[in-house]
Image (cartoon, rainbow, N blue to C red):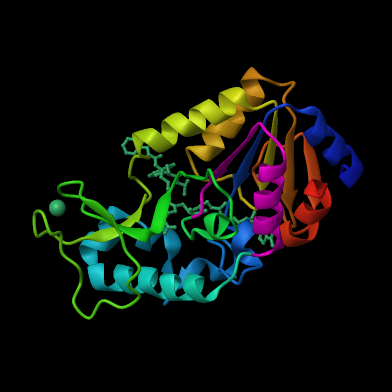
């Protein structure tokens, strides 16, 4: 396990740092992760609900899951990890942030440029005509329909089995190309395309340090690892 001092040195020496976050960075804001014990909802696996098929089979159940998450996130606050990242990114040049989370907590912590590769809980999206809008509703007595084509609107997230948006993939690709060090926080490293990006990076640029912060095991191909939580370690790693 690498100590905090060596991680700080690596990050300070890199003229471009890419930060990749997953559900674990929001865990200390009270948001359940996907594969921890919060990974089930009313007996359904997250992967089942977060899918076109799940929505098709039971749009009301899937919307109830997303609306419950909107209510939970609306009551939650960004934690010390989100804040430490936001402040660090303002203090130095050459940083990018790609998050797999859809909760919007990085932006609420003041992080300016965030690539939300899996979309946003705070958008609705029509998968028939592509219409998309920002949405803050936390209750839908009647499920929302598209103002353009009248089909059912779904949440503006990327489901399992759906393609990532072109803009998000392009910006993520660019961020990996620019990176001279990568800091991976709170992800199991199991979900593509982020998992593929990380493995490809290790193959192509073995000299690029991949630093991981996680209290548990993961599939992240890290070169340096700090075992601990995001809210505990990020303020120590990123403080001025
Ligand atoms: C795509 C939005 C290509 C929704 C999410 C077989 C069949 C079908 C598909 C596939 C398949 N095999 C692979 C795939 C591709 C699939 C995939 O990867 N599946 C996985 C399950 C194997 N990926 C996709 O489908 C992607 N699209 O590949 O398109 C394509 C091409 C052509 C045509 C069609 C498609 C789209 C994936 C996006 C899925 N949407 N979210 C929603 O949120 O409801 S993913 C979801 O998982 C969340 O975004 C979450 O962030 C993400 C990743 O999980 P993690 O963030 O890692 O969370 P997890 O719970 O797993 O881990 C938490 C970690 O935190 C743990 O390690 C834990 O130890 C740690 N932790 C806990 N507490 C803390 C902590 N760390 C720090 N501090 C703490 N306090
Ligand atoms: Zn539509």
Q: Which residues are magenta?
A: 79-101
The answer to whether residue 221 is left or right of residue 151 is right
Residue most toward the front? Answer: 91
Q: Residue at x 30, y 69 (%)?
A: 63
In this image, 157 relative to 236: left or right?
left
Q: Is residue 3 visible?
A: no
Q: Is residue 37 visible?
A: yes
Q: Nearer the viewer, residue 36 or 142?
A: 142
The quadrant of the image that shows the N terminus is top right
Residue closest to the eye, 131 or 57: 131
Residue 119 on the magenta span: no
In the rendered image, residue 56, in percent from the top left (x then y), is placed at 21, 60
Residue positioned most to the top: 204
Q: What x and y, as percent, mark residue 60?
A: 25, 73
In front of the other: 56 or 163: 163
Position of residue 201 measured from the top left corner of the image (x, y, whole percent): 61, 26
Q: Quadrant of residue 148?
A: bottom left
Quick one: which residue is furthest to the bottom in this view? Answer: 141
> Is residue 61 shown left or right of residue 151?
right
Residue occupying the point 71% across, 54% down: 84
Q: Is residue 158 above or below residue 27?
A: above
The image shows residue 151, relative to residue 30, as above or below, that is above
The residue located at (62%, 69%) in the rendering is 29
- Look at the image and say whether residue 92 sits in the magenta stretch: yes
Residue at image coords 80%, 38%: 224
């Amino acid at each position: 396990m690498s100590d905090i001092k060596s991680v700080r040195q690596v990050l300070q020496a890199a003229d471009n740092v890419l930060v990749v976050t997953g559900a674990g960075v929001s865990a200390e804001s009270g948001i359940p992760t996907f594969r921890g014990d919060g990974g089930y909802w009313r007996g359904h696996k997250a992967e089942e609900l977060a899918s076109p098929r799940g929505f098709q089979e039971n749009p009301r159940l899937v919307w109830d899951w997303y609306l419950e998450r909107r209510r939970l996130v609306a009551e939650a606050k960004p934690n010390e990890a989100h804040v430490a990242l936001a402040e660090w990114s303002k203090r130095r040049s050459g940083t990018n942030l790609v998050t797999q989370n859809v909760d919007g907590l990085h932006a609420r912590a003041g992080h300016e440029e965030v690539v939300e590769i899996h979309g946003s809980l705070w958008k609705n999206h029509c998968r028939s005509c592509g219409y998309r809008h920002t949405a803050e509703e936390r209750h839908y007595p009647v499920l929302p329909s598209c103002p353009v084509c009248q089909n059912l609107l779904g949440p503006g997230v990327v489901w399992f089995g759906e393609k990532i948006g072109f803009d998000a993939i392009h910006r993520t690709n660019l961020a990996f190309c620019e990176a001279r060090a990568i800091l991976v926080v709170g992800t199991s490293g199991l979900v593509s395309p982020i998992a593929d990006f990380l493995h490809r990076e290790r193959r192509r640029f073995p000299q690029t340090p991949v630093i991981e912060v996680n209290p548990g095991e993961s599939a992240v191909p890290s070169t340096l690892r700090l075992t601990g939580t995001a809210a505990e370690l990020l303020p120590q790693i990123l403080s001025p």
